[in-house]
Each structure stands twice: as structure tokens, then as C-alpha cells.
Image (tube, rainbow, N blue to C red):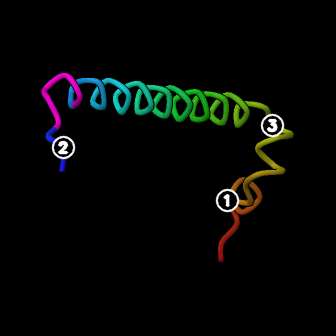
């Protein structure tokens, strides 16, 4: 079994960090787009059903 050097671990760590950064940016962009979309009344009515129940007793 070949031993891995510190440089190998550093390279793997850099690759994992790069992938995690991309995932984080994609998730933040998705949250931003979804929150901006909910500011449009037509989209909000299409996506959520809560606005129709607001002010109506159960």
C-alpha cells in the first residue's frame, strides 16, 4: 500500500473545498431566486396556498 504525502492530502482538500464552494454558491443563488420570485403576487399565489387562507377562520 502506497503512503500518501501531505501534498496529496492538500490537493484532495483543495478539490473538496472547491466543490463545496460551488455547492454553497448554487444553494445561495437558489434561495435568492426563490425569495425574489415570491415577491411577485402571481408567483406567490401559484406556489403557496397560505395567502388564500389568511384572515379566514378554520
Residue 35 image point, x, y percent: 62, 33
Task: Point out the frontmost of discs 3 and 2.
Answer: 2
Kindly check if marks 3 and 1 are in contact, taking CB atoms under 8 A apart as contact. Answer: no
Residue at coordinates 41% horizontally, 24% vertically from top-left?
A: 18
In three-dimensional space, the C-alpha distance between marks 2 and 1, rounded to whole angstroms, equals 68 Å
SS at badge 3: helix
Which residue was labeled with disc 3?
41
Tell me if residue 11 comes above or below residue 47 in the rendering. above
Q: Quadrant of residue 13?
A: top left
Residue at coordinates 66% horizontally, 36% vertically from top-left?
A: 34
- Asked whether 45 or 11 is in front, the reply is 11
Q: From this viewpoint, which residue is outermost toward the bottom?
A: 58
Residue 49 image point, x, y percent: 74, 60
SS at badge 2: loop
Which residue was labeled with disc 1?
55
In three-dimensional space, the C-alpha distance between marks 3 and 1, rounded to whole angstroms, equals 17 Å
What segment carries the magenta color? Answer: 4-8
42 is within the stretch colored magenta: no
In three-dimensional space, the C-alpha distance between marks 3 and 2, rounded to whole angstroms, equals 61 Å
* Residue 2 numbered tag: 2
- Asked whether 17 or 23 is in front, the reply is 17
5 is within the stretch colored magenta: yes
Residue 32 image point, x, y percent: 59, 28
- The image shows a total of numbered marks equal to 3
Specify which label sits upstream in the sequence, 3 or 2: 2
Specify which label sits upstream in the sequence, 3 or 1: 3
Horizontal side, residue 33 vs residue 40: left or right: left
* Residue 7 numbered tag: none
Residue at coordinates 36% horizontally, 33% vertically from top-left?
A: 16
Residue 29 image point, x, y percent: 58, 27
Amino acid at each position: 500500500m502506497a503512503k500518501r504525502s501531505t501534498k496529496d492530502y492538500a490537493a484532495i482538500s483543495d478539490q473538496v473545498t472547491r466543490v463545496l464552494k460551488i455547492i454553497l454558491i448554487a444553494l445561495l443563488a437558489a434561495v435568492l431566486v426563490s425569495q425574489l420570485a415570491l415577491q411577485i403576487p402571481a408567483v406567490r399565489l401559484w406556489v403557496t396556498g397560505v395567502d388564500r387562507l389568511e384572515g379566514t377562520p378554520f
